[in-house]
Amino acid sequence: MGLSNLSELIRGRRSIKKGYTNQEVKKELVLELLNDAVWAPTHGMREPWRFIFIDQDHLPNFAEKVARTYPEEMQENRKNYLMEPNAILVVVMEAPPLPKQWDENFGATAAMIQNFWLLAWEKRLGVVWKTNPHIYNEEVKNLLNVQEHEKIVGFLHLGYFDDIPEDKGRTKANDKFTVYGQ
């Protein structure tokens, strides 16, 4: 018995970090994908996420501002790094004070991001989830209007691609699986 289409999609998805084409990532497509992605499991139907889209036209200004939050000797490198994708989707999560709710919100947001990633992959839109130091920087949070009760979960770098990175494989679940009491 072969793999289902979903299994193939899950196993075939890759992080696309470089090698983006010049094709513009349109906000309409990102919204279409997000409208399906938000069907992820979410505890108490809190839907703890919100999104900030930086398109190709606004990316240079945004990259410059974020790069300025780094030490001077790193700024050019960080600016170039942030200019690699064709667009960035910033995912912000409600960060409640109760650890249980915080964990639930993060789990739901991560599941939503995975849904988005798989849906994007189907359209040959490459995604990589970035958690660089700037997501914790107060100046970047202010730039993005992130509130005190929120957390930037990551920057999703987006861009169309031609070449699929090689399959690095995965450890089989059998190797990390135990049965309680045995």
Image: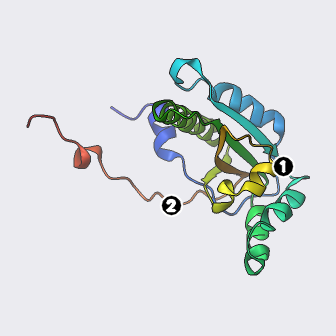
Local secondary structure at mark 2: loop
From the viewer's side, name the closer residue of 82 and 145.
Answer: 145
Local secondary structure at mark 1: loop
- Residue flagged by tag 1: what amino acid is it? Glu
The colour scheme used to paint the residues is: rainbow
The CA span between labels 1 and 2 is 25 Å
Residue 65 lies left or right of residue 73; in this view the side is right
| Disc 1: which residue | 24
Q: Residue at x 60, y 41 (%)?
A: 117
Residue 44 lies, with reference to residue 3, above or below; the image says above
Q: Residue at x 25, y 47 (%)?
A: 176
Residue 143 in the image: x percent, y percent? Answer: 82, 51
In the picture as drawn, the residue positioned furthest to the bottom comes out as 73
From the viewer's side, name the closer residue of 168 and 43.
Answer: 43
Residue 72 lies, with reference to residue 50, above or below; the image says below
Residue 43 lies, with reference to residue 29, above or below; the image says above
* Location of residue 119 (image quadrant): top right
* Location of residue 62 (image quadrant): bottom right
Residue 106 lies left or right of residue 35; in this view the side is left
* Location of residue 82 (image quadrant): bottom right
